[in-house]
Amino acid sequence: MSALDAVRPRSRAFWGDARFFLGILLVIASVAGVWFVVSAARQTAPAFAANRTIVPGEAISGDDLRLVDVSLGQLGDAYLQPQALADGLVATRTIPSGELVARSAVGDAAAVRTTSVVLRSAVDVPASVRAGSVIEVWAAPLIERGLYDTPRILVADATVVSVTRDDSMIGGGSAALEIVIPRADVAATLAAMAAQSALSVVPASGASQ
């Protein structure tokens, strides 16, 4: 038997052992990877959820929120966490009851461009209109007693804070609403109320209720 033939079995044995140990390492790596994924999925962090529907411009306090433990993974920084709750925070959009509060849904009160007003609708409002609903405010200017001009949009984008319906015969089915409107629309809205225009509200086109 030549020297070359004597070497070959040892070479095959060496590479066979190497593949064996490599296979073990791959199994260990696979198990470790699965453990890491499962462990990461089980990790939770505290975040805030709304206790009630919060509308744009409303100040946010601890009473409006509740802490929940949720698994957000890499999205954790996108949501309001306990250490980020501070005085002067207001909602910048409607936050439905139970929804996790995103950082993008809150802002500094000084930067808010909306305010709230209370108006009375000349007629009852649809049953679907409630806190958090997006509505249009229409106004029919008063021409003379009992005679009104054609209604036109007064505020194209308002959010309802609260609705008080008057179902009595005297009330005639009218309703009082507190709404959030852009500051740019405040002057026209107050002028319409002072001029005794007939106001009415309808759900905004395409708005989800």
Image: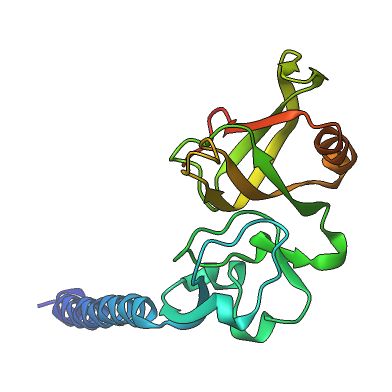
> Image point 86% across, 31% down: which residue?
195
Residue 3: horizontal and vertical position, in percent? 20, 80
162 or 206, which lies in front?
A: 162
Check the image and report above or below for 194 versus 69.
above
Q: Residue furthest front?
A: 170
The N terminus lies in quadrant: bottom left
> Image point 44% across, 66% down: which residue?
98
In this rendering, position of residue 32 left or right of residue 116:
left
Check the image and report above or below for 1 versus 154.
below
In this rendering, position of residue 185 left or right of residue 29:
right
Q: Residue furthest left?
A: 1
- The way the protein has been coloured in the rendering is rainbow
Residue 25: horizontal and vertical position, in percent? 28, 82
Check the image and report above or below for 112 versus 87.
above
Labels in figure, total: 0
Check the image and report above or below for 146 versus 10.
above
Residue 189: horizontal and vertical position, in percent? 82, 38
**Res. 88 image quadrant:** bottom right
25 or 167, which lies in front?
A: 167
Q: Residue furthest bottom?
A: 83
**Res. 18 image quadrant:** bottom left
**Res. 103 image quadrant:** bottom right
> Image point 61% across, 37% down: which residue?
135
> Image point 67% across, 42% down: which residue?
120
110 or 103, which lies in front?
A: 110
Residue 177: horizontal and vertical position, in percent? 63, 48
135 or 173, which lies in front?
A: 173
